[in-house]
Every structure is written in C-alpha cells, then in structure tokens.
Image: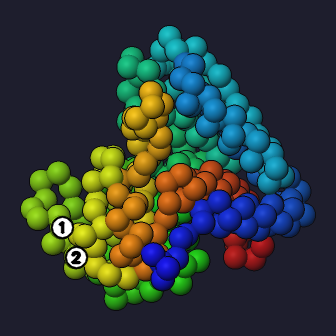
C-alpha cells in the first residue's frame, strides 16, 4: 500500500471548479453574459433533491446563472417535454439537465432525445453519443469525463495502455470506452456475459469499474501497478444496523496491488458536478462562437 497513490477526487474537483470559475469571468467579458444552467427535478426523491441542491450551490459558486425547476412526481410526460421545449428556446439557458431517475410514467429516452443537443450537458443525447463514438467533438457525459481527468492528473499514460471497462451503460461504460479509444488505448469492455473477468483484469493497465456490484473486483485480479478508477457507489450494511458506501472494487485488497486508485467515497463522485460545470461552460462557448481554449 505504501507505493499506491490514492487519487483525491475532492482535491482535483476543487481545483477544476476554481479553474472554471476564472474562465467563467473571462467568458462573461467576451460574451457580455454568464453561462446559464437549468436543472429540472421531477418528484421528491431525497437523494435527487440533495444532488440538485449541491449542483445549484456549485454552479453559483462558479459564477454561473443557476435555475432549478421543481415538478410534481405526478407530472405527465407531455408536461415535462413542454418544459424542455421552453428551455430549448430560451437563449439564456446554455445547459439543460433533467435529473434522473424519472417517475415510471415518463419515458426517460424520450426526454433525453427532446433536449437540444447543444444544451445537453449530461452528454446523453443520441447526437452527442454518436459524435463521441465517431471521435467528433461533443458534449461528453460528466462521470466518464471525470474519470479521464483523474487519469490525466495522476500522470497515467492512456496511449498504448490496455484498458478494461467493466460495465456498458450509456452513462459510464460506453462513453468512457470511447474516450479511452480517443486517447489511443486498447480497450476491452466487459459485462455480465464476459468470461473470466479475473483474467481480463490481470491483463489491464487501466481498470475502470462501473458495474454497480459492491466490491466485485478483487485485488488479486489486478495487475500490479494498475490504475484503478472505481465509479461504483453502493450502500451496504455496516454490521451495526447502519450502512456504508463502497465501490465496485474491493478497496482493502486492491489498494495493496494498484499503482493508483480512487477511493469511495471521495474519488470519482466529486468530479461529476465539476465536469457538469465544465460542460455548461463548453456549451456556452459553442453557442456564443467562442473557442473554449481561448479562455
């Protein structure tokens, strides 16, 4: 464990937010306005409410314009789509995020597809997903973007590396595989039908675990010195009637083998909102004809 570097997502996210805040001011000087993010929350899921509140706080701290629209859990799909259409047409809104999960009566894919791709700061619209898969500039899902930033900050060489992505969701697995390919890694995507996952892990220089199964990836599976990014957030019994958060990687055994590793909590999680802010600024730049690299 003494040779293992723990990737502090909180510190990396804080530095990224500070960098974004400075760029927001420079954007404002060029564009004559500030980037605007609107988050839509349907229902009263406690975890979603906390997450939306934190997004609002961090958006405002970055100097952006933040709005939240709260809709009843009984809201129809037609009414939610009408709200999305209004936000699409609002020139002051650069980013639209509809908080997931949505109530059962609403088709999540229909809502994602209704968002203007230029304002899709979650990076989930089929247009953005397709552009990413083709290696074309696009708005990228926040968590995969955070994974790549953590690898970069840790000095992990992606080009030429054997990278294993465990999980194939549209939220993390598929987009992070595309980002790794864009970085010239050799990428394997493992899933529930994959054979001999330990052998796949043993051959990987980079392991990104996003499968949603508590502590599934064991330290003895890993190649010594591998970079391990644990996207999982699972609540499990603690043994005293309480619960604790663990990742998809068995941290106590993995930390003895990995070269670098993210903890849970405090690893990938803090990066997600920071990358949402970055996407909002990027969207604002694109919509205003400003090169993000110029800020």
Q: Secondary structure at mark 2?
A: helix
State whether residue 190 is above or below residue 119.
below
The quadrant of the image that shows the N terminus is bottom left
Label 1 Cα neighbours within 10 Å, binned few <14 / some 14-19 / many ≥20:
some
Say which residue label 1 marks. 198
State whether residue 208 is above or below residue 72.
below
Image coordinates for residue 242, horizontal then vertical, percent: 48, 31
State whether residue 135 is above or below residue 62.
below
Q: Are marks 1 and 2 in contact (CB under 8 Å)?
A: yes
- 91, 59: nearer the viewer: 59
Quarter-wise, where is residue 205 in the image? bottom left
Q: Is residue 74 left or right of residue 10?
A: left
Image coordinates for residue 166, horizontal then vertical, percent: 28, 60
**Residue 252 visible in the picture:** yes
Residue most extreme to the front: 240
Q: Secondary structure at mark 1?
A: helix
Say which residue label 2 marks. 202
Compute the Cα span from label 1 to label 2.
Answer: 6 Å
Residue located at (70% from left, 72% from top):
291
Image coordinates for residue 180, horizontal then vertical, percent: 39, 73
- 131, 155: nearer the viewer: 155
Residue located at (62% from left, 28% from top):
49
Q: Is residue 181 left or right of residue 34?
A: left
The quadrant of the image that shows the C terminus is bottom right
Q: Is residue 253 left or right of residue 74?
A: left
């Amino acid at each position: 464990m003494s040779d293992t570097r723990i990737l502090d997502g909180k510190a990396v996210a804080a530095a990224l937010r500070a960098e974004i805040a400075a760029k927001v001011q420079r954007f404002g000087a060029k564009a004559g306005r500030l980037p605007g993010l609107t988050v839509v929350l349907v229902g009263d899921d406690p975890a979603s409410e906390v997450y939306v509140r934190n997004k609002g706080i961090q958006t405002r701290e970055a100097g952006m314009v933040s709005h939240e629209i709260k809709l009843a859990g009984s809201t129809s799909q037609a009414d939610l789509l009408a709200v999305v259409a209004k936000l699409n047409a609002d020139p002051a809104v650069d980013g639209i995020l509809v908080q997931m999960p949505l109530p059962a009566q609403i088709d999540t894919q229909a809502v994602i597809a209704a968002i203007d791709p230029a304002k899709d700061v979650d990076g989930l619209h089929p247009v953005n997903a397709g552009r990413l898969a083709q290696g074309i500039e696009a708005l990228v899902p926040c968590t995969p973007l955070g994974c790549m930033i953590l690898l970069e900050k840790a000095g992990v060489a992606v080009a030429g590396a054997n990278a294993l992505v465990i999980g194939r969701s549209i939220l993390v697995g598929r987009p992070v595989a595309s980002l790794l390919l864009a970085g010239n890694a050799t990428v394997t995507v493992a899933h529930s039908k994959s054979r001999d996952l330990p052998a796949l892990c043993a051959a990987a220089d980079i392991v990104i675990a996003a499968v949603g199964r508590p502590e599934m990836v064991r330290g003895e599976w890993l190649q010594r010195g591998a970079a391990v990014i644990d996207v999982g957030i699972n609540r499990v019994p603690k043994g005293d009637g309480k619960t604790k958060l663990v990742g998809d990687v068995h941290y106590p055994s993995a930390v003895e083998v990995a070269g670098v590793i993210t903890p849970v909590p405090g690893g990938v999680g803090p990066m997600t909102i920071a990358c949402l802010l970055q996407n909002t600024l990027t969207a604002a730049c694109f919509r205003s004809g400003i090169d993000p690299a110029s800020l």
